[in-house]
Amino acid sequence: MASDPRYGPRLGGARLQVGPGPAARNETLAAFAFNPTTDQGFVVGLPFLGGKLETEFWQVDQAVSSGIDDDVSWRRAGDLVFLAWQTPDDGSTDPSLLAEAGYSRLLTLARRLERPCLLRAWNFMPDINAGDGDQERYRRFCLGRAQALEQAGIHVPELCAGTAIGGRDPVLRLFVLAGSRPGINIENPRQISAYCYPRIYGPRSPSFARATALPLPDGDMLLMISGTASVVGHKTVHEGDLTAQLEEIERNLRSLLNESAARLARPQLGDFGPGSLLRAYVRHQSDWPLVRDHLARAWPGLPVAGLEGDICRSDLLVEIEAVCVG
């Protein structure tokens, strides 16, 4: 693919590091500001419930260039680019149209920047569970996203780790990390791959992998784990029971970590350790203390951000995503 003179020449591989604070001598590719008292990153439009992870920094060891193209904000370093797009969403427009428009812009720019491979995606939308049957807003969103991916020639092997969470802020926010080379997708043996869900979950299955591993230039692997909930096979389990859902999520995360360690031949990825962090999306604010305490027992000392948000299924109370390195 020829270089686009507007964005300069292709650069070499960048080492990506994710943490709760800026690392010395590193450049910030992206930052998510969860606590409203901070103003140094993208906002996700969800109330901050607590935790030590007030800002999440995605940093690289190379200079970062940035710009805005077709309303998409981009920040690029080496073979990586972080893209962000948002639009008002007051419920008057079909989410499938918004999702298709947004992902089409993101994917077009990723290709133009010569970083067409999806590595991680986050999707935040209002009223994610509103609507009945196939008219549910999340199902409509999945339809539009799938159409945009299909039009861009991106199919199951190219899907990446992803999160989709609902809130009250009337804005659709899409964030994508992309690169010049694909990551390594990992599926959870305890769960059916989301893109293989049966028709009962909507006209198009959710388009994401359970986790994506990114090989780093120094030989490490950065493992990015999708939003993980109390789902076994394709079914929700423990409806209405927060403690049981947390225990099931813990089993799913440990299963996914073990699968990643085996697939990548990296025993150190078998559990969360130094360089790991968690985001917990909690449907009801009053449930946060129980979620916080459970995670502190399961993985002591891990930086955690608690955010109030609606999970993509109305019978789920909590969802947890993670990043670790090994």
Image (tube, rainbow, N blue to C red):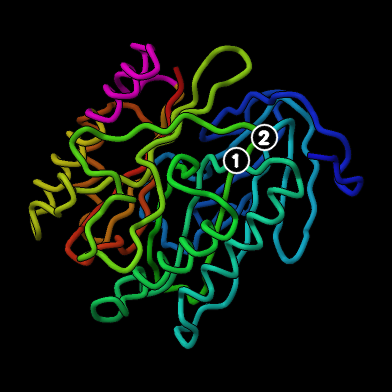
How far is mark 1 from mark 2, CA to CA? 6 Å
- Residue 168, position as x, y percentages in the image: 41, 73
Mark identifier at residue 135: none
The image quadrant of residue 200 is: bottom left
**The C terminus is located in which quarter?**
top left
Magenta stretch, main secondary structure, is helix
- Residue 195, position as x, y percentages in the image: 34, 51
| Among numbered discs 1 and 2, the one appearing first in the sequence | 1
Which residue occupies 74% across, 41% down? Answer: 114
Is residue 284 visible from the viewing direction of this image? no
- The residue furthest bottom is 92
Mark identifier at residue 180: 2
Q: Amino acid at mark 1?
A: Cys
Q: Amino acid at mark 2?
A: Ser
Circles 1 and 2: CB atoms closer than 8 Å: yes
Which residue occupies 80% across, 42% down? Answer: 65
| Residue located beneath label 1 in the image | 117
The image quadrant of residue 312 is: bottom left
Position of 307 with respect to 250 (left or right) is right
First to last magenta residue range: 255-274
